[in-house]
Image: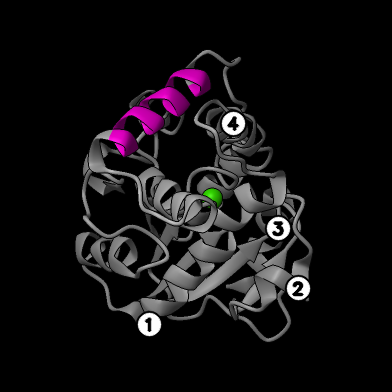
Amino acid sequence: MGSDKFSLKGKSAVLFDMDGVLYDSMPHHAKAWSKTFSDFGMHMDLTQVYMNEGCTGSYTISRVSLAQRGYDATPEEVERIYAHKAELFRSMPEVEIMPGALDLMHRVRDCGMKILIVTGSGQKALIDRVLRDFDEFMVRERMVTSFDVSRGKPFPDPYLKGLEIAGVDASQAVVVENAPLGIQAGVAAGIDTIAVNTGPLPDSVLLEEKPCALFHSIRELADCWDSLL
Ligand code: CA
C-alpha cells in the first residue's frame, strides 16, 4: 500500500507508539506473556500476543481470563500476573532501538513537527530508557503511558490525551502504530494513523483497522518521510 495519496500537509504533531515502533521489543513481550500465562494455568500463542498488543496489561489479562476460564481475574490476581510478566521482561536482554527510529525522529523534528509518545506500556524501565535514548526529542511531559489514562488502547483515550498535551486538533496530528488495537485507538481518536507492520501478522489484519498508509519498517517510513510532506 505504501503512501499512495497520503500526505502530511497540515500536520503539526506526530504521536508515536513505543513497543514495535521505537523499540524492537515485541519478541521479548511475546515470550514474557506466553510464559506468564502458562505459569498461571492459561495460554497465549504468538498471534494472540500480537493481536492484543497495545492495550494495557490488565486489559490483556482480563480478555484471556474471560476467554479461557469463563471468569475475569480479580484486581489482586491481575496485579500478580502483570508483576510476573514485568519481572520476566526485565530479566531479558536489553531491547534494541528500532532501526531507523532515530533517523525518523530527526526528520520529524527538522520539519518542525511536535513529537509525542503514546504507549500502553507500564514498564517503568523502558519508559525511563526512552527519555535517555530519545533525550534530544523527548521529555516525560510529552509521553502518555498506562499511568496517565484509565482506559488504554484500543480506546481512543491515550491518543486524545496526546492531542491535549500537544495542543493540536485531531486533523493536525498523525499517529504511527504497528498493532491492530493501536491503529484502532488512533482511528477512534479521529487521527490519521500510519501503520508500520514490524511484526508477524499479515498486512490484511492491520489494514482492516483503516490506517491511512502502511509501511513495512520504520526505516522505510523514515526514508519516505520527506516525500510525504
Ligand atoms: Ca506497539
Q: Which residue is mark 4?
A: 38
Q: Amino acid at mark 1?
A: Ser
Residue at 63 percent of width and 37 percent of height = 30
Q: Which residue is mark 2?
A: 204
Who is closer to the viewer here, 42 or 7?
42
Query: Which region shows up in magenta?
Result: 77-89
Instruction: Kindly report the secondary structure that dominates the magenta region of the rendered protein.
Output: helix
- The label on residue 212 is none
Quadrant of the image for the N terminus?
bottom right
Residue 61: % across, % down: 43, 46
Residue at 72 percent of width and 55 percent of height = 223
Q: Which residue is mark 3?
A: 197
Left or right side of 176 for 76: left
Q: Tag 2 or tag 4, which sits nearer the N-term?
A: 4
Residue 141: quarter of image: top left
Q: Tag 3 or tag 2, which sits nearer the N-term?
A: 3
Give SS at disc 4: helix
Q: Which residue is mark 1?
A: 171
Residue at 50 percent of width and 51 percent of height = 64
Residue 186: % across, % down: 44, 70
Task: Give the CA distance from mark 3 to mark 1.
Answer: 23 Å
Residue 229: % across, % down: 57, 73
Give SS at disc 1: helix
